[in-house]
Amino acid sequence: MKSGRIYSIDIFRGFTIFMMIFVNDLAGVRAIPDWMKHVPADVDGMTFVDVVFPAFLFIVGMAIPWAVEHRLEKGHSYTDLTIHTLIRTISLLVMGVYMVNSAEMNDSLNLIPHALWSISLYAAIILIWNRYPATDHNKTRFRVLQGLGILLLMVLYFTFRKGTSEDPMGMTTSWWGILGLIGWAYLISMLFYVPFRQSSFSIFIIILLVWSIEILLLGGWFVGNSLALWLEGQIMHLTHTLIVMTGIAASILLKRNPTDTSWSQVVIVFLLYALILYIMGYASADFGGISKIAATPAWGLYSAAICTVTFGLIYWITDVKGWKSWADFLKPAGENPLLCYILPSIFYAIVGYGIWPEALGVGVMGFLRAIVFAVFIVWIGGLMTRWGIKLKL
């Protein structure tokens, strides 16, 4: 394995964001097969659509060891690392809650029209979390732009209304949203990883520990215990953390191979790792079943196994064979994932959901439209990246 940047990590991240855009748009298409939809909560099973969100959790985990090492090598202290982790988590939670509430808005009660409120939200996100050039000359101007973004978020908070005219409400945390769930899983995983980063064995033990806790909880072994009752309500976060930790372990396996290690050995290690995750998932199937909605451990581990094999294939194609040009269109999504993730919401806030002809919302034509839309969004993300808009938490 050659030393230097692991291109497959960036490509896998870009592919995951591309698939997120695609499946989110596909959700609005009628008359498509069930395997193109999320499996309902009352059905035991999963489709490829149910693997997309855990794929992002997995790549978040894969990036953690490299990011932590990079920061420590630059001279950052553990205090700096803790502050950075907390800021990133809070940022994801804030964005997640705002995006969830945007979808729950009561248009007739809200003090600002829905479209304008949503556009203003994403403008604020860009103003606050854009990576501005590190120059002293424009530092004050950039701080002012971030301040305007924070002020805009405050205005949106106080003008927001949902509920009914008889029982109007402001913002609430009905759930954390996709970004918020990622934030919690990231925070918990960092709390596990950083203290034990020097011991690869400990990381794998932590994976087994989190998995075992879930199995014991779902198996009813902790009945009547107040801590167990609280943990049962955190199964979703435990499973998401489990997926992130499996991504961390995947990077550890990659990093532990010296630069002169045969690529075939690396691929074999990943296949064996995927097999172990699959077996753990199979053993978990009787504990909550297989469900993305319920975030069961079987769903999480099956997804992690699929991600491991997918990453191994991308690694073989790009880092071993050197075939990278095929993934050039994914580069903006890999380098600027947060921007590409919010761009569809910006697009529909501007043009509305009724933009598509009836024929493009049904069956094969709707499927093709979702693919073209995802390519278009990633292309727009590339343009905005070149214009200096690159979101960084």
Image (spheres, rainbow, N blue to C red):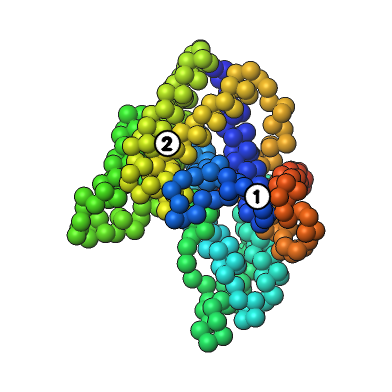
Mark 1, mark 2: which one is toward the viewer?
1
The residue lying at 64 percent from left, 69 percent from top is 152
Residue 334's label in the rendered image is none
Please provide percent x and percent y for residue 182.
49, 50
Label 2: how many residues lie within 10 Å, few (<14), some (14-19) or many (20+)?
many
**Dot 1 amino acid type:** Ile
User: Which of 100/83 is in front?
Assistant: 100
Q: Which residue is mark 1?
A: 32
The residue lying toward the viewer, choosing from 49 and 91, is 49
Secondary-structure class at tag 1: loop
Q: Which residue appears farthest toward the bottom when viewing the image?
A: 166
Q: Position of residue 70 (x, y in %)?
A: 51, 34
Residue at the far right in the pictured view? 357
How crowded pointer 1 is (Cα within 10 Å; few <14, some 14-19, many 20+) is rated as some
On screen, 288 above or below 117?
A: above
Left or right, residue 375 beside residue 301: right
| Residue at the spot 59% in from the left edge and 27% down from the top edge | 314
Tell me the kind of residue under disc 2.
Thr
Q: Earlier in the sequence, mark 1 or mark 2?
A: 1
User: Helix, strand or loop at disc 2?
Assistant: helix
Q: Is residue 69 visible?
A: no
The front one of 131 and 21 is 21
Residue 326 x, y percent position in the rendering: 71, 28
Q: Which residue is pictured at 71% across the width and 70% down the height?
A: 116
Q: Residue at x 43, y 48 (%)?
A: 44
Question: Where 312 falls versus 23 (above or below)?
Answer: above
User: In the rendered image, which quarter is residue 28 located in?
Assistant: bottom right
Q: Which residue is mark 2?
A: 246
* In the displayed structure image, the side of residue 213 where residue 27 appears, left or right: right
